[in-house]
Amino acid sequence: MQQLNSVLPVQSVYIIRLRKTIEKTGLSRSTIYNLINAGSFVPKIQISTRAIGFLESDVDAWIAARVAASLGV
């Protein structure tokens, strides 16, 4: 079995649930799911059979990219 630190960087990794993702992005649940299905949002992580989450760093990077795009940077 491969160790986690050989797959992911040494920095702390946080999985945030959908509710926190909605708060951070300002998007609705249905919009997030539509973006996931269109391949325009960060990949979801299956936490359990009925729960998903997202890497907080991926969500933060997605937000930063959207801000940069809107500013023409």
Image (cartoon, grey):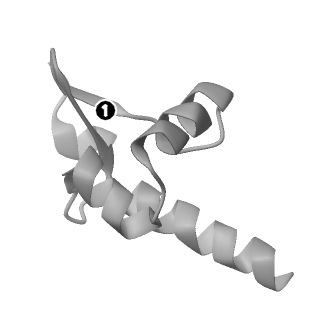
Residue 19 in percent (x, y) is at: 24, 52
- The image quarter containing residue 69 is bottom right
Q: Say if residue 43 shows up in the picture.
A: yes
* Towards the viewer: 21 or 43: 21
Residue 3 in percent (x, y) is at: 16, 34
Picture residue at 16% right of the left edge, 20% below the top = 50
- The crowd level at tag 1 (other Cα within 10 Å; few <14, some 14-19, many 20+) is some
Picture residue at 64% right of the left edge, 32% below the top = 39
- The image quarter containing residue 24 is bottom left
* Towards the viewer: 63 or 22: 22
Report the side of 69 relative to 39 (left or right). Answer: right
The residue that disc 1 covers is 45
* Towards the viewer: 35 or 59: 35
Residue 48 in percent (x, y) is at: 13, 22
Q: Quadrant of the N terminus?
A: top left
Picture residue at 31% right of the left edge, 32% below the top = 45
* Towards the viewer: 3 or 17: 17
Kind of residue indicated by mark 1: Ile
Q: Quadrant of the C terminus?
A: bottom right
Point out the residue furthest to the right here. 72
Q: Secondary structure at mark 1?
A: strand
